[in-house]
Image (cartoon, rainbow, N blue to C red):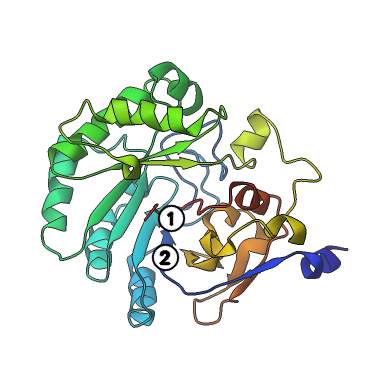
Amino acid sequence: MATQLIFQAPSVELKKLTSLWFLLTGFTCNLKCRHCYLGCSQTNKSRNYLNLDKIKTVLESVKDEGIEEIYLSGGEPFLHRDINNIIRHCLKFNNVTMLTNGTLINDKKARFLRQIEQDYDYELIFRVSLDHYTELKNDEIRGRGSFRKVVSGLENLVNYGFNPIVSVVNIWDEDEESLKNGFLKLLSKFDFHPTDINVKIIPLIKSGEYEKNYSAYKEDDIVTRQGLKNCDTSLFDCANSRVVAEDGIYACPALLNDPRGRIGSTLSEASTKIYMEPNICYSCQASNKNMFTNNW
């Protein structure tokens, strides 16, 4: 039955690999958020860290393939003991976006990161996770005290000339325009002028901690050919992205816990096609936009 479902499920073909992701710290994180689709935490060491030598090998193999963006993610990538050298090496090739919760970015760290960026022609971008512009709602999800730490990290980045993006999971299904405006107002308290590009709102992914704490996908929350007729699948992350993890290549950051998301051992041998069988893929169909890459 499983094999039959795989061949019945709609598929998405990799159009062009423009976004390359590195899962640096597996699922190890200094926070434990109640909605984390990967189940990241301080104790989740089910994935090994990615070493610098493997990152170097991968980047060398794709240097002529037109990669436009490099993403460093986890877990919390700043927990990687070699993170500074990883950032340096990636900046030799392209713009780098770090997906971080921002709690470890103090004044000294922000100043040091700015010094690193100034040594290269490419830009270092920060996507900082914050799930509400009010302290009470954010800390309900991310843990008591997290809001103030994240806001401090954002302010430190701004103080050293960075233009951070706030990454928001719309866990309460609020009006997106209202949610965005709330964050723009919060960011305006710092010494820069945020625009729409500084807020990325991500739909819910009902797996991992969210499934444990709230609810799961329904039985009929599946991708269908009829449902995809109203979608622009070229926007989907699996049409332009690949994730390099310690154990192989995945089609999408959301499928790192699902063996169906693993499409090969190396980029050169990885399948260019992903069957949208997992329920997680339904979130892409429902939102009809890029879930993870930056909005530009």
Residue at (46% x, 40% y) in the render: 201
x then y, percent, for residue 106: 20, 35
The quarter holding residue 157 reads top left
Residue to which mark 1 is pinned: 293
Residue at 56% over, 27% down = 172
Identity of the residue drawn at 51% across and 48% down: 45
Nearest to the observer: residue 243 or residue 132: 132
Decide: is 134 above or below 290.
above
Viewer-proximal residue among 282 and 287: 287
Is 267 situated above or below 214?
below
The number of numbered badges drawn on the structure is: 2
Is residue 145 found left or right of 292 in the rendered image? Answer: left
Q: Residue at x 33, y 73 (%)?
A: 56
Tag 1: amino acid: Thr
Please state which of residues 23 and 120 is positioned toward the viewer in this rendering. 120
Callout 1: SS? loop
Mark 2 belongs to which amino acid? Ser
Taking depth in this image into account, of 241 and 194 the one nearest to the observer is 194
Give the percent coordinates (x, y) of residue 132.
43, 27
Residue 128 at what x, y percent from top left? 35, 40
Name the residue carrying label 2: 19
Q: Secondary structure at mark 2?
A: strand
Res 80 seen here: no
Q: Which image quadrant: the N terminus?
A: bottom right
- Within-10-Å neighbours for mark 1: few <14, some 14–19, many 20+: many
Q: Where is residue 160 shown, x and y percent of the image? A: 13, 42
Quarter of the C terminus within the rendering: bottom left
Contact, CB < 8 Å: mark 2 with mark 1? yes
Q: Is residue 259 visible?
A: yes
